[in-house]
Image (spheres, rainbow, N blue to C red):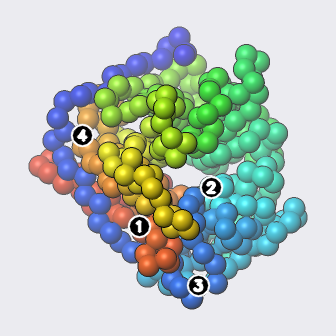
């Protein structure tokens, strides 16, 4: 913790606004040339199209138009420019010029693609296993979050800033972490209009802001809601028990932090009892998604909603999505989030 860190408790008062999740569209159809799996990573690019990567499709990424119709695929397996291993385990971020940034954690690099999916630049992210990244507002590099060995621990969640050539500019945080959390924590990141980078903590309901202009100072928001259980399943729980609570995504807009967290569904025991052979578990009965909106300047709870499935942010941070099976056809269902209520900001969130 930095000496000048400002710590704000997240208020437990009743929120005054309501979160509205309006279903915008879905991606995926029986005759698509690829499939949609869980996990998948999705982003909306400058053209309005959506790019989706999933481990089931290997190195190939799928493009859908703004109406959810399959358009094309790109990407091939390999280690050269424009080649990938499994970007579905990585992250996609849009670029202002209509292009795309692709984090492929297994080739350990970020690839900059043009609006026609041609490789423009490669940035080596180093030896650590990087699970998330955000471009710096200045355009001079990236913030990386992932896993590696530290001086004090065999396993730690490490956040750092690098330049476009892959050189370390700043070590932001090193958090020694229980190995079990590596399966569930994807190092959520967000940027705000002030140039700061917000990061979630791996085993707590807490987020911190790092300012490149003032690396020694930081802001931390933390809460202890009774629904957040960060530890492993209790003794005696079956192996199929849902994962511990963990923050899955962050979004910063207009001074507000949108925090999405996965928690165990109250019906998870029914979902794992006497499963039918070859029929997948009903994931909507395993995990829920809690969405909270926090005033980043005061810690006040603005709104809260519980959704009957885990939610992720698109790479442009304007939409939330879930992965469902609809008649054995896997689909990505996208939601447009907004706030409703007196004196609440409304309207669709802009891309970040």
Q: Quickly name the residue at label 3.
A: 32
Residue 283 in the image: above or below residue 4: below
Point out the frontmost of discs 3 and 4: 3
Front residue of this view, candidates 57 and 252: 57
Residue 276 in the image: above or below residue 250: below
Q: Quickly name the residue at label 4.
A: 302
Disc with the residue nearer the chain's start (3 vs 1): 3
Q: Which mark is residue 91?
A: 2
Q: Label 1 crowding class (10 Å Cα cut-off): few <14, some 14-19, many 20+?
A: many
Whether tag 2 and tag 1 are in contact, CB under 8 A, the answer is: no
Gap in angstroms between the C-alphas marked 4 and 2: 28 Å
- The residue lying at 38 percent from left, 33 percent from top is 228
Point out the frontmost of discs 3 and 1: 3
Q: Give percent across and percent down for residue 171.
A: 69, 27
Point out the frontmost of discs 1 and 4: 1
Seen as rendered, the residue at the extreme left is: 342
Q: Give percent across and percent down for residue 63.
A: 59, 77
């Amino acid at each position: 913790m930095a000496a000048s860190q400002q710590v704000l408790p997240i208020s437990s008062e009743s929120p005054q606004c309501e979160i509205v999740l309006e279903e915008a569209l879905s991606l995926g159809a029986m005759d698509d040339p690829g499939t949609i799996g869980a996990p998948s990573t999705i982003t909306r690019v400058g053209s309005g199209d959506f790019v989706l990567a999933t481990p089931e499709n290997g190195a190939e990424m799928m493009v859908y138009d703004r109406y959810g119709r399959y358009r094309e695929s790109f990407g091939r397996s390999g280690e050269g420019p424009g080649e990938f291993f499994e970007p579905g385990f990585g992250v996609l971020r849009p670029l202002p010029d209509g292009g795309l940034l692709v984090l492929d954690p297994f080739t350990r690099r970020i690839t900059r693609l043009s609006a026609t999916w041609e490789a423009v630049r490669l940035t080596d992210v180093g030896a650590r296993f990087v699970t998330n990244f955000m471009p710096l507002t200045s355009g001079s590099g990236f913030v990386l979050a992932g896993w590696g060995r530290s001086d004090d621990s065999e396993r730690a969640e490490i956040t750092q800033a690098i330049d476009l050539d892959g050189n370390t500019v700043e070590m932001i945080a090193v958090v020694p972490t229980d190995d079990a959390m590596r399966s569930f924590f994807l190092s959520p990141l967000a940027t705000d209009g002030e140039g700061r980078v917000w990061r979630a903590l791996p085993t707590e309901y807490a987020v911190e802001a790092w300012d490149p202009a003032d690396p020694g100072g930081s802001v931390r928001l933390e809460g202890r809601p009774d629904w957040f259980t960060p530890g492993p399943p209790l003794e005696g729980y079956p192996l199929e028990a849902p994962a511990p609570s963990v923050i899955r995504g962050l979004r910063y807009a207009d001074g507000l932090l949108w925090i999405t967290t996965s928690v165990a569904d109250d019906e998870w025991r029914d979902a794992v009892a006497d499963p039918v052979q070859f029929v997948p578990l009903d994931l909507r009965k395993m995990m829920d998604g809690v969405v909270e909106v926090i005033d980043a300047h005061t810690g006040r709870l603005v709104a809260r909603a519980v959704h009957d499935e885990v939610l992720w942010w698109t790479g442009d941070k304007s939409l939330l999505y879930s992965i469902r099976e609809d008649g054995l056809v896997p689909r990505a269902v996208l939601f447009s989030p907004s706030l409703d209520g007196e004196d609440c900001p409304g309207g669709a969130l802009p891309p970040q």
